[in-house]
Amino acid sequence: MYLRLSPDEESIKDIFDSFFDAECSIERVRTAEESGFDATAWERFIETGGPGMCLPESCGGGGADLTTAAIVANLLGTYVAPIPFIEHVVAARLLASLDESNANLPLLATGEMIGSLALQSLHDSTSAIVPAGAIANYIIGLRGEEIVVAENTTDASPLRNTANLPIARHNFDDAIVIASGEQAHNAYLRAKSEWKALMAVALTGLGRKAVDIGVGYAKERYQFGVLIGSFQGIQHGFATSITNVEGSHFLSSRAIAALEEGADNSAQLAGMAFLFASEAALDAAATSLQYHGGYGFAEEYDIQLYYRRAKGWPLQLGDPGLEYQHIANLCLSKEGVV
């Protein structure tokens, strides 16, 4: 369980912490701002076995569970790393759950091919905005009861967005159907829940770091000859923010565990964790930015990087109000109301 790590999981955390510290420093994050992707960092990530860590060993993966992915996702949020780990691992796991013999799985396992998931069902539309869509070349989507794949999609241009993410709109006119029916539909919904849970974990890491940045600034900034960190109002603001962030840690941990166990309420928990972590991370980043004063809006200060991602990462799923409605429908359907 992601909440309490075993000695082996602590070792994995240390390994990837060292990786992100070396390959996704804040200077590298700034360098990757224009495209939202650091190709060199991805190449180094491939060397760690990260892209295929959660795929079955039979197709070249590491056989790790979702808890291991959560460890990496949390660090990704801490460093706001410009690599598509969450999108890739979710798409690859979905494909493996549908067909372990698929010829593209070894390429996804090595990271030579980058996968992503279209989070919005296509319905009558033939296109969708896709997370990491500007760099992914294997995109899985849901069209009715069919799971479709758009391959070799490397010509999409990033769409301008607050967080400088490599999102792009993709056309699914020529997409290939790889599965259909209720089982395939449920597999897609599980993959979407995994994305929500892992994004909640990443946002928790982001929120913690945002508070750390703010606290560090408050310990150095003087106002009227006094450290602003000594002001009770500022202390209370940080206390509220970190309390909410730790709450998102508990809830996202429960969501990861529920998905691992195949619990009936895993979809609800994933959605709840995603929404709570989204709000907690944005509050933490906004509070720290506010306590920076005017400097918080300056590009020279790191807090703006965290604030923009706290705003932008959750919006990849779409309107948060729809997710609240989705959770309500899940709860009410279990009670026989809808």
Image: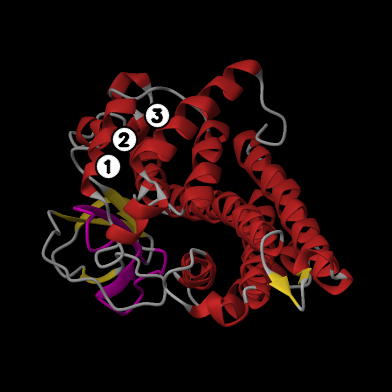
SS category of the residue bearing label 2: helix
Residue 201's place in the image compared with 244, above or below, is above
The answer to if 5 sits in the magenta stretch is no
Q: Picture quarter containing residue 56? A: top left
| The N terminus sits in image quarter | top right
Q: Nearer the viewer, mark 3 or mark 1?
A: 1
SS category of the residue bearing label 1: helix
The residue shown at (71%, 59%) is 219
| Magenta segment | 119-143
The residue shown at (69%, 43%) is 253
Are the two marked residues, 1 and 2, in contact with CB atoms closer than 8 angstroms?
Answer: yes
Q: Which mark is residue 42?
A: 1
The residue shown at (23%, 37%) is 43
Query: In terms of depth relative to the viewer, which is nearer, 153 or 312?
Result: 312
State the separation of the CA atoms marked 2 and 3: 11 Å
Q: Is residue 223 visible?
A: yes
Q: Seen in the image, is 152 located left or right of residue 267?
A: left
* Few, some or many residues within 10 Å of mark 1 (<14, 14–19, 20+): many
Residue assigned mark 3: 53
Residue lying at the far top in this picture: please name it.
7
